[in-house]
Amino acid sequence: MRTKILLGLLLLSFTFCFVSCDEDTKEEETKIPENIDRSFSNKFSPLQPRQWSIVDNYYIATFTDTYNLNETAWFTTEGIWQMTKTDVPETQMLPYAVEYTFAHSEYAGNKITAICKIERLNMKGALYRISILKGEIRQNVYIQTDGILIRTLYGNNDQFRLVKVPAEVNAYMAEYYSQAPVLGILFNDEGHIEIYISHENNLKRVELSWDGYWFSTSWQMKDTEQLPEYVTDFIAQHYAGYSIRERRYEISNHGNYYCVRLITNDDDIIVSIRDDSQE
């Protein structure tokens, strides 16, 4: 009997040891450096994180804001905030300008599957991503806080692969567009970084590689600007039955182009025609 009691106590002590060790390990795994914790408090106080995780050397906090919305924030190991994503459960919670732009866009009437707000370091305001199902195609519509429709990308595009804008991209923007406010930062379907800026009374899209190599800068043509006759003739000859939805002018490392978006009931394409006047 005494032997059984001693054996039971021994097993209990081992069990306690394992539980204690597991708890110690868990505490070590979730322990956040003071600089990260301080950065979170400085930006989001009095909110408290529900959970911390570490992915690709970023400290990621999930928490609930004062409106009971779920938020996720990314910090570098140095404690520098980079980005916040806020889930928006319904369109009525969008800023009026964003809701108005979407309601009067070509995407209105499609099924909305998700909405979130994206805020980034060095970006003015926020981008609202409205995910829609257009037929069987998933698309993400990005609208800036002031109601400017920035871009539409396909639904499999993962914006959260781009957390911190590379130093080379920032260096290029500082050299060529240092005074231009940044209204949007996106990761496009080709794997390039797009910086949207307000420059020379235009919303310009600057497309760069991750290492800061410049591909192009483009902007939407104003209603008062006309396409050259050779461009409209080319479209009429080769794309009869299509209507023009959007006209952009693009300067790139291989020439300047008129980029015209053409649509029919079942097709949506972009035709790029070289600007002959620049040759």
Image (cartoon, rainbow, N blue to C red):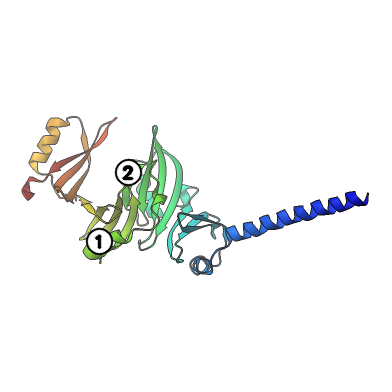
Residue 38 is situated, as x and y percent measured from the top left of the image, at 52, 69
In the visual, does 249 lie left or right of 45?
A: left
Quarter of image, res 132: top left
Residue displayed at 21% across by 63% down: 176
Quarter of image, res 181: bottom left
**What type is the residue that disc 2 sits on?**
Asp
Quarter of image, res 266: top left
- Asked if the residue at tag 1 contacts the one at tag 2, i.e. Cβ–Cβ closer than 8 Å, the answer is no
Q: First in sequence, mark 2 or 1: give its number.
A: 1
Residue 243 is situated, as x and y percent measured from the top left of the image, at 21, 35
In the visual, does 11 lie left or right of 30?
A: right
Kindly identify which residue carries mark 2: 189
**Viewer-side residue, 14 vs 84:** 14
Give the CA distance from mark 2 to mark 1: 21 Å
Up-down relation of residue 135 to residue 94 (above or below): above
**What type is the residue that disc 1 sits on?**
Tyr
